[in-house]
Amino acid sequence: MNFINKIILITAVGIINFVHAQKIDNKAKGILDAVSANYKSKNTLYFKFSYGTGSGKISKNQTGSFYASKDKYKLKIMGNEQIFDGNKTYSINEDEQEITIAKQNSKETLSPINYIDSYKKGYNIHYIGKNKNLDIIKLTPTKNNGIKEVFLYVNTSKNNVEKIEQYSTDKHITTITITEYKENPKIDSKIFTFNKNLYKNYLITEL
């Protein structure tokens, strides 16, 4: 799995149908419901984030940015970009000069706007407590998927997630910390459009 797909995994986790029964406490569910409703109510979203990875502890940090307009989004990190125009996903690797194009339907849209709903479908959800002004919710998968546990740090006064920590069964740690967040910013719709003319020397593969 390449780097940009790992980003999408942590921010969108899954779109997988789990068959095991869930354990969901009402306080945690109420917080996630409010966050989900807040994200979905916005026409556009923007955030800058710090992405950390490591085995046993965080040893590497990178900065990325994310723009969204309803189900469309653009993600950029480490010279890689991913664009979803509402119909197809374009994964652009600048170092390798390669582009992969994949068609997706609306139910498979990988966006932070709907990742909380995806978590609720495949994870036991428990309210842990507070860390300063942030409420902590622990998620554990209902089925073995390589993830041991996930912690969401939620600002309930603003109904948004400020930090995500994911711990894998192989002791790998991944974190996303939101460093800048804007609701309904003005975003040029062109950034969600893939312009093939800009990548004349790239190898393009359409799945």
Image (tube, rainbow, N blue to C red):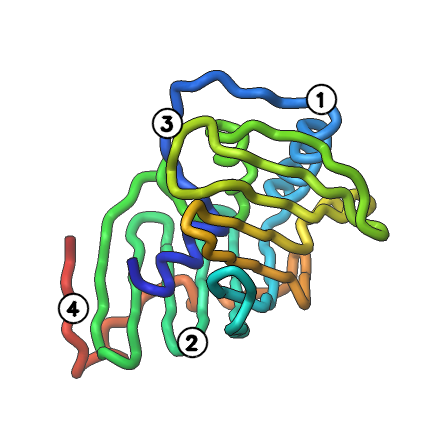
Cα separation, mark 3 vs mark 1, equals 22 Å
- Going from N to C along the chain, the mark reached first, 2 or 3, is 3
Q: Determine whether label 4 and label 1 are within 8 Å by CB.
A: no
Cα separation, mark 3 vs mark 4, equals 31 Å
Q: Nearer the viewer, residue 96 or 185?
A: 96
Cα separation, mark 4 vs mark 2, equals 20 Å
Amino acid carrying label 2: it is: Met
Amino acid carrying label 3: it is: Asn
Residue beneath label 1, please?
26
Instruction: Nearest to the eye among marks 4 and 1: give it.
Output: 1
Per the rendering, the mark at residue 78 is 2
Residue beneath label 4, please?
204
Residue 104's quadrant in the figure? top left
Residue beneath label 3, please?
17
Q: Residues within 10 Å of mark 4 (few under 14, many from 20)?
A: some
Q: Locate residue 50 relative to residue 181 in the image: left or right.
A: left
Q: Residues within 10 Å of mark 1 (few under 14, many from 20)?
A: few
Q: Is residue 205 above or below residue 169?
A: below
- Going from N to C along the chain, the mark reached first, 3 or 1, is 3
Q: Locate residue 202 relative to residue 112 in the image: left or right.
A: left
Cα separation, mark 2 vs mark 1, equals 39 Å
Per the rendering, the mark at residue 93 is none
Q: Residues within 10 Å of mark 3 (few under 14, many from 20)?
A: few
Q: Residues within 10 Å of mark 2 (few under 14, many from 20)?
A: few
- Going from N to C along the chain, the mark reached first, 2 or 1, is 1
Query: Is residue 128 in view from this perspective?
Result: yes
Q: Determine whether label 3 and label 4 are within 8 Å by CB.
A: no
Q: Could you tell me residue 187's position as x and y percent?
A: 55, 65
